Image (tube, rainbow, N blue to C red):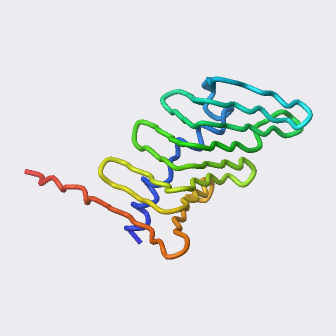
Amino acid sequence: MTFVLCLWLWVAPASAQGLFATSATGEPVDITANELEVLEQKKQSIFRGDVVVTQGDMRLRSDHLVVFFDEQNQIRRIEAQGQVELVDPQRRATGERAVYDRQEDILQLSGQAVVVQGENRVAGDEIVLYLGENRSLVRSRDAGRVRAVIIPEEKTEEP
């Protein structure tokens, strides 16, 4: 049980929730890219080429990013594709694709998904973070296997 709890504490980037829940942090979201296409009828914004999203000390990079809006023009879903990297001061997550569903409060990282915090590392074909439930799932497809490397903290002796 302690292992699962420790694994969750560093696998689930709480910052991912902050990055996508823009109204919760109050900090502005800054998105830069080589190109932006707005599809008003479809309620989508498509960013292409060296996409960088920053909010506070969190950063998301990808080759391509699509933001889907609901009827109230609130972010409903975000899809990042191609060399995805999500970084905050404590951890770094990478993969080929990331999808955040705001209603479900789920972040899916897929395509050689890896989350690293310090020397600790979890890898699989897909990492699903159930942000509202404080739960994560790491999967590998076909004959692949998930891998977790956990480095125990050194205990300091009290005098």
Q: Write the residue at 85% across / 35% down.
A: 43
Q: Position of residue 98 (x, y in %)?
A: 61, 48
- Residue at the far right in the pictured view: 41
Does residue 36 sit above or below 149 in this rendering?
A: above
Relative placement, left or right, of 53 versus 94 is right
Q: Quadrant of residue 40?
A: top right
User: Is residue 149 toward the left or the right of residue 56 in the image?
Assistant: left
Against 99, residue 49 (above or below) is above
Give the camera-side residue of 118 and 154.
118
Q: Position of residue 92 (x, y in %)?
A: 43, 44
At a point 60% along the width and 25% down the height, the residue shown is 27
Residue shown at the point (52%, 62%) measured from the top left: 125
Left or right of residue 127, residue 47 in this image: right
Q: Position of residue 79 (x, y in %)?
A: 68, 44
Count the numbered circles shown: 0
Q: Is residue 58 above or below residue 109?
A: above
